[in-house]
Image (cartoon, grey):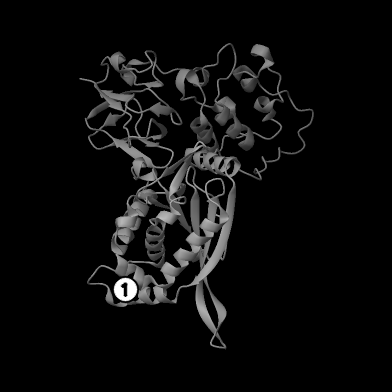
Amino acid sequence: MAANVIMPRQGQSVESCIITKWHKHPGETVAVGDVLFAYETDKAAFEESAKVAGTLLAAFFQEGDDVPCLTNVCVIGNPGEDFSQFDPKGGTPAAEAPVKAAAETAPAAPQAAVAAAAAPVDGDLKISPRARVLAESHFADLSKVSASGPDGRVIARDVQALLDAGKVVTPAASGAYAGGASGTGLGGRVSLKDLEAPAAPAAKAEAPAAPAPEAAYVDEPLTNMRKVISKAMIQSLSSMAQLTHTLSFDCTEIQSLRKLYKEQGEALGLTGVSLGDMVLFAVARTLAKPEHRALNANLIDGTTMRYFKGVNLGFACDTERGLMVPVIHGADKMSLLQISSAVKELAKACRAGTINPDLLKGGSFTVTNLGALGIESFTPIINPPQTGILGVDAIIPRVREVNGKVEVFQAMGLSLTYDHRAIDGMPASKFLADLKSNLENFLLLLAKG
């Protein structure tokens, strides 16, 4: 009996997911546990494995499609089995398994196979915009393409297959699909017939055609995650009155404590506590003070301040797919060791692409740390609708006068960006001053619990 495979819901806040890659295709045998397809939300990537064995009868969506959660994506069953009841579109699926054995189908002539695969409509070659851009920029020979998209549509992977096989044309010949050939299709567009027509004999053939020059650049579409980050950053800068204040503090005490944890904290599990973890602990305790509630808040639609009773502390995490901001909920109630453990678990899930999207929501304040890269000062961008974000800078030696003598000390920089609509410069500066005091007297902060 045929079994449907739905698009899972990864977190209560996720409404749809994008299919990024099919690992199985219609007609292929599927075993329990085989990866069927990969998909992603705006922040995380996942893979869906088969729960039953059989043959993949149909795939209702293509790579790049945005599929609503809980929608049928594909069907597994026995060859020839009816699966129309599972089709979410009520029509022909994007790809369908053959219902007859290959031996029952007579082989077609090579030229006819090309034409059938390309499936022109009214003489026009059907090709997706992404595939056309890829073909034009790399001079792919579309006369040799085999279409694998729905209704004989040429998609990007078909063009890539041509390029991998070395099936390219010279720049002059590539005008056949870039606009340099006479089109016989509708509206004068280039058709498959135009591409397959024999070239006019050259007046002279004194020298072989020059090889196609290698493109000087590569065009790649933005990933879904990059688009989300771009939209959020533009929204942040265009809709807020952002201002950044900076100061530095003497980090001698937290450096000494960090060294102590590494050397003697193994029994207590403290060896993994980092300077960044200590900063997060101090930030959470400082934000919890009533006088700093405007920074532990969200400004909703520019009209309503949402003040959080606890500190939901986000921290910037760099991944191969882009910047992610997981949230430590209730960070003001956690111990230093608990915060350190939460950071490592959340960061690991982000980098593996398996984090629950709900753990990327609901932050009241964010910390981003570039100190390890030697950045001495920067202007972090607020993660809307939050009202502030703290940048942690590098540790650099500074000098100061103590009892008439000049001494060198290790200073760590802090860069606070705040939304001037929600908070004025004086209270923002007081937050930085309190945070500096807590970090310079970290043992006392720990003693307060």
**Residue 15, image x and y in percent?**
38, 30
Decide which of 103, 236 is in the foreground and name it: 236
Q: Is residue 34 above or below residue 328?
A: above
- Name the side, left or right, on which 150 lies relative to 50: right
Decide which of 447, 107 is in the foreground and name it: 447
Decide which of 3, 125 is in the foreground and name it: 3
Q: Which residue is mark 1?
A: 261
**Residue 167, image x and y in percent?**
57, 34
Q: Is residue 87 above or below residue 47?
A: above
Secondary structure at numbered mark 1:
helix
- Residue at 23%, 70% (x, y): give it: 268
**Residue 233, image x and y in percent?**
55, 44
Residue type for callout 1:
Tyr
Q: Quadrant of residue 56?
A: top left
Q: Quadrant of residue 92?
A: top left
Q: Is residue 229 above or below residue 157?
A: below
Rate crowding at label 1 as few (under 14), some (14 to 19) or many (20 or more) other CA atoms within 10 Å: some
- Residue at 56%, 45% (x, y): give it: 421
**Residue 126, image x and y in percent?**
55, 20
- Name the side, left or right, on which 227 lies relative to 439: right
Q: In the rendered image, is residue 114 in sight?
A: yes
Question: Residue furthest toward the front?
Answer: 291
